[in-house]
Image (spheres, rainbow, N blue to C red):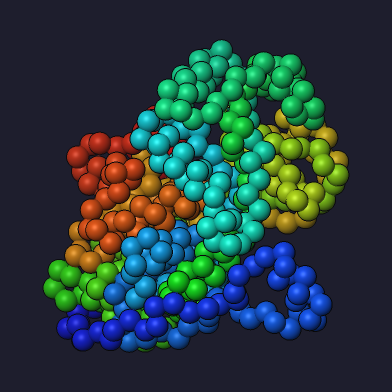
Amino acid sequence: MLIQRVPEPQPKSADPRRVSSGSYSLWRLLREGLNGQRGWSRAWAKAVPRPGYRVVIVGGGGHGLATAFYLATKHGITDVAVLEKGPIGLGNVGRNTTLIRSNYFHPENIRFYEFSLKLWEGLERELNFNTMVSQRGTLNLFHTEAQRDLFTRRANQMRVLGVDAEALSREAVKALVPLIDLDNGRYPVLGGFLQPRGGTVRHDAVAWGYARAASEAGVDIVEHCEVTGIVRNGGRVTGVESTRGFIAADTVCLAVAGHSSRLAAMAGLKLPIESHVLQAFVTEGIKPVLDTVVTYGAGHFYVSQSDKGGLVFGGDIDGYNSYAQRGTLPMAEEVAAAAVTLLPGVARLKVLRQWGGVMDMTMDGSPIISKLPVDGLIMNGGWCYGGFKAIPAGGVTTAHLIAHGAPHPLAAHFGLGRFAAGRTVDERGAGPFPYAH
């Protein structure tokens, strides 16, 4: 819904900092245990929206919360509200397979995702929150000589830029992951490439950690506040309409993943994005059998083992446009077939649950961190499969764009204008087809 409204004077920022649940430490855990756990308070304040803010971020997922946190801590901008239509953590940030890595091919993408991986490595100390960062390694398998050449090129490009990558023989793959059937009848494994610093992070803890830290820095986290309209005065955004009333803003940032096109349409814009469903699954808990992340080069399949013992795995998008947070049985069957082919022992396990995330798939498979054609409107989206691993870097670079009005050097190639100029960043070389990335 496109609304024209004359902006009203905005109030000044409220208190610059607020204390949430305080500092976490071993000493405090012991003290609260002896005190009957009565000293804890809310992890983040349940804010009521004020009439106006300097910055309104639509979307309380990983990228929205990270952007708010870095605006407050790196740029001193605390007059910020994060609007989430439901509770924090129930969107895409909690609907993924929790993988982090920086093993890309294009130099620009390697630098960006390596920056994100380095931020992950220090995130728990920065947030004072246990996000369960586990750098157990990410293993990419290859099954043909052509694939070996492709992976070798990627690994060499990573090494040139100072990023870790190791080539593994068939024997080394088997030693690392004994469950793998190297000589499976469909796609025998010829070897693999390992990024030792890749791994997993607890997705719920990422949302909670950033929400807590942003709230403590002075940001308003407003839950159950769905945006229903983008308000404009001529060619400039002046705020948003929401289920909790009009909220004025100098800058509005869209960080809503698969709903990016819907929100942009409220401002009269059409984005080069399609929304698709991506499924994920988790099995019953078993004893530790897989201490690395494994991706299947002959199909889109990836698997790791959670701290609770369940195997967490996923595959390709369902291949049709949808905003539903659930998938279809044909894709579930395809993912299960890949799992049993690569890891035959998985056939004996029960799948406990399945979920789906709404993926914002761009025409070149790379994200958009950019100003939009309406003044005061910023976008962080189009992450395809790479949104979770990019949360820290996405937050830093989007906050930089909002604070300085210019793109961060590491994200300059993610501008919206690249599509009109023909400067697409097609990591997979799949062409202008969102479903193919």
Q: How many numbered marks does the figure carry?
A: 0
Q: Residue 211 at what x, y percent from top left?
A: 52, 68
Quarter of the image holding residue 208?
A: bottom right
Quadrant location, the C terminus: top left
The answer to whether residue 335 is seen in the rendering is: no
Residues 376 and 360: in front is: 376
Q: Farthest left residue?
A: 234
Name the quadrant containing residue 161.
top left
Residue 187 position within the rendered picture, expressed as x and y whole percent measured from the top left: 67, 21
Residue 29 in the image, given as x and y percentages of width and height = 74, 69
283 vs 395, left or right, is right
Pick the quarter of the image with the N terminus.
bottom left
Residue 228 shown left or right of residue 296 in the figure: left
Q: Nearer the viewer, residue 324 or 224?
A: 224
Residue at horizontal 73%, vertical 49%? 306
Which residue is located at x 54 percent, y 54 percent? 123
Front residue of 361/69: it is 69
Going by the image, does 103 lie left or right of 23? Answer: left
- Please say if 392 is above or below 52: above
Task: Work out whether residue 52 can be spotted.
Answer: yes
Q: Residue at x 35, y 52 (%)?
A: 397
Indicate the quadrant where residue 239 lies: bottom left
Residue at (19, 40) in percent of width and height: 421
Q: Residue furthest top?
A: 145
Q: In the displayed structure, would residue 214 be above or below residue 202?
A: below
Q: Position of residue 371 (x, y in %)?
A: 25, 57
